[in-house]
């Protein structure tokens, strides 16, 4: 943890949000909660952010679950909002990405930034974010899917543990 990040974390803990720069108080960003396994370890685990303050492993299960680390890193400029997850100003501003996912062009949107009737059945992996554009664009344009990319508590679909029974 850098000295700058330690100082920002201590200030935030001692003085609350009032001690953070205005950027970290941006009301359009819901940083979420601190309820993942690696919360409060000095690295931001939420893939909605990007930058040198991020962990190396990105999991969709960590969205909105490392608020203190991400807020502190955002305040110091060590992370910024990942453009793929930024709230679009309008529907035309959504960055759908490309079709390089293993499951691209199969008729199902596999990108956690979009949610619809079949989302509870899906397994959302970080490597599919921004890489199933045609399926997601078609579902979004038809009204079957809606945007949830900026949310700290998105519909997450099935987990590996749910599918395998924890084995």
Image: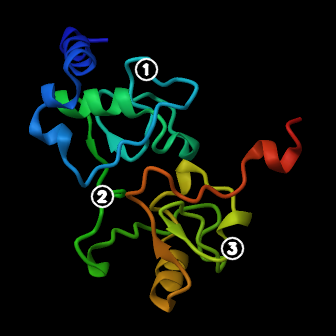
Q: Quadrant of residue 33?
A: top left
Give the number of the disc on residue 86.
2
Above or below: residue 3 compared with residue 107 = above
Alpha carbons under labels 1 and 2: distance apart: 23 Å
Q: With 84 as the anchor, is 135 left or right in this view? A: right
Give the number of the disc on residue 118.
3
Residue 142 picture location, percent across and down: 51, 91
Identify the residue at horizontal 52%, vertical 63% (top origin).
100
Q: Quadrant of residue 147?
A: bottom left
Q: With 30 as the anchor, is 77 left or right in this view? A: left
- Earlier residue among tags 2 and 3: 2
Alpha carbons under labels 2 and 3: distance apart: 23 Å
Q: Quadrant of the N terminus?
A: top left
Q: Nearer the viewer, mark 1 or mark 2?
A: 1
Residue 37 picture location, percent across and down: 58, 25
Q: Residues within 10 Å of mark 1 (few under 14, many from 20)?
A: some
Task: Say which of 154 and 14 sits in front.
Answer: 14
Q: Residues within 10 Å of mark 3 (few under 14, many from 20)?
A: few
Q: Quadrant of the C terminus?
A: top right
Q: Nearer the viewer, mark 3 or mark 1?
A: 1
Give SS at disc 2.
Answer: loop
Task: Say which of 13 and 39 sits in front.
Answer: 13
Identify the residue at horizontal 23%, vertical 22% (top origin).
12
Give SS at disc 3.
Answer: loop
Identify the residue at horizontal 87%, vertical 45% (top origin).
164
Residue 23 picture location, percent across and down: 14, 41
Q: What residue would you read off at disc 1?
A: 40
Give the number of the disc on residue 164.
none
């Amino acid at each position: 943890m850098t000295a700058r990040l330690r100082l920002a974390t201590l200030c935030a803990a001692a003085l609350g949000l009032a001690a953070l720069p205005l950027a970290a108080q941006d009301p359009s960003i819901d940083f979420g909660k601190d309820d993942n396994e690696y919360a409060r370890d000095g690295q931001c685990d939420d893939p909605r952010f990007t930058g040198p303050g991020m962990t190396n492993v990105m999991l969709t299960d960590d969205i909105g679950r490392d608020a203190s680390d991400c807020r502190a890193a955002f305040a110091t400029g060590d992370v910024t909002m990942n453009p793929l997850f930024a709230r679009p100003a309008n529907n035309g501003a959504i960055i759908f990405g490309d079709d390089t996912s293993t499951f691209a062009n199969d008729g199902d949107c596999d990108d956690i930034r979009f949610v619809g009737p079949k989302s509870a059945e899906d397994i959302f992996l970080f490597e599919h974010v921004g890489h199933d554009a045609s399926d997601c664009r078609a579902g979004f344009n038809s009204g079957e899917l809606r945007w949830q990319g900026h949310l700290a508590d998105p519909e997450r679909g099935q987990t590996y543990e749910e599918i395998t029974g924890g084995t």
